[in-house]
Amino acid sequence: MNILLYITTVLIWGTTWLALKWQLGVTAIPFSIAGRFLLAAFIMLAYLLLRKKLTIPKGEVLYLILLQGVFLFCCNFLCFYTASAWIPSGLIAVIFSTSTLWNALSARFIFHKQIQPKVWQGGGFGLVGLLFLFWPEISAHSASLNVLKGLGLALLGTLFFSSGNLISARLQTLGATPVQTNGWAMLCGATVLLVGSLFSGLSWQIDPSPRYWGALVYLAFFGSVIGFTAYLLLVGRIGPERAAYSTVLFPIVALNLSVWFEGYHWSLSGLFGLGLVIAGNILVFYRPSSKKGEGIAVLKSNA
């Protein structure tokens, strides 16, 4: 089961970067994000209602869901969308992939969880690999003020994402499943965006193009309902630091889509970087079995 959740997360989130790009332009960023999560929240909550499993969050669960909505479905997306105006998407993907290490550090200092050396080693392999993959874009950018702003916002967005991971892990220890918490948290995040946009005086102009609406539906259903649910289920099953390694791999999917849609060409440094990412993935998730001659993957289902 864990392997299926992991592959689903990598493949879906690897394709959402292109869909996000198709939403930029006419419609203000907060409205695009809010529309995505309002639709996703409606789908998830309606599904639970039809199955008579919808519950109203209370107490600590309600408080944590509000925080998750602000961190995971509002602030981090605002940071990444804005940063994309100043730095390349490849560089943003590199920064975002550091969530592997941020999750491990947060789990260590907040939950006092021991960090295994291979998590650091595997994460390091993955990050260096991504650096090789995106080095042409990185080296082509001078350290202007706008670039530094973009770097700062991308890092801040990653920290928001990592914080949302830890909140989800805490919610699952309280017995709240991601299917329940995501729906309410997405509704909270979208509401904050809409209220903030109303007071900021942003234009309410909506892009009427089929590509924009197609991207919105894809991001809402696949990127949000399925993608976030699969990822946060993975957080609960294998821990936030291991689950976050999917964020190291999904830029590889995005990069291959760029070959088809944006004219990207593989280089020797790119192929070398891909090898490092794969090596890091094996290092983090594989461990020898106690039985001689056998091995088990950490992602093997524990169901």
Image (cartoon, helix red, strand yellow):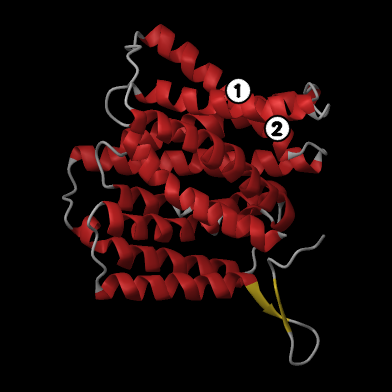
Element marked by disc 2: helix
Q: In this orientation, which residue lies closer to the viewer: 82 or 38? A: 38
Q: Quadrant of the C terminus?
A: bottom right
Image vertical order of residue 75 relative to residue 297, above or below? above
Image vertical order of residue 29 relative to residue 173, above or below? above
Image vertical order of residue 294 relative to residue 287, above or below? below
Q: Could you tell me which residue is drawn at 62 percent across and 70 percent down?
A: 285
Q: Could you tell me which residue is drawn at 21 percent across and 61 percent down?
A: 136
Q: Could you tell me which residue is drawn at 64 percent across and 42 percent down?
A: 229
Question: Is residue 125 shown left or right of residue 84?
Answer: right
- Judged from this view, the residue extending furthest toward the front is 210
Q: Position of residue 114 (x, y in %)?
A: 69, 61
Question: Is residue 279 shown left or right of residue 208?
Answer: right
- The residue that disc 2 covers is 181
The residue type indicated by label 2 comes to Thr
Q: Position of residue 265 (x, y in %)?
A: 23, 65
State the image quarter where residue 68 is shown.
top right
Q: Distance between the Cα atoms at labels 1 and 2? A: 10 Å
The residue type indicated by label 1 comes to Leu
State the image quarter where residue 184 is shown.
top right
- The residue that disc 1 covers is 187
Q: Is residue 114 visible?
A: no
Q: Position of residue 103 (x, y in %)?
A: 58, 51
Label 2 Cα neighbours within 10 Å, binned few <14 / some 14-19 / many ≥20: many
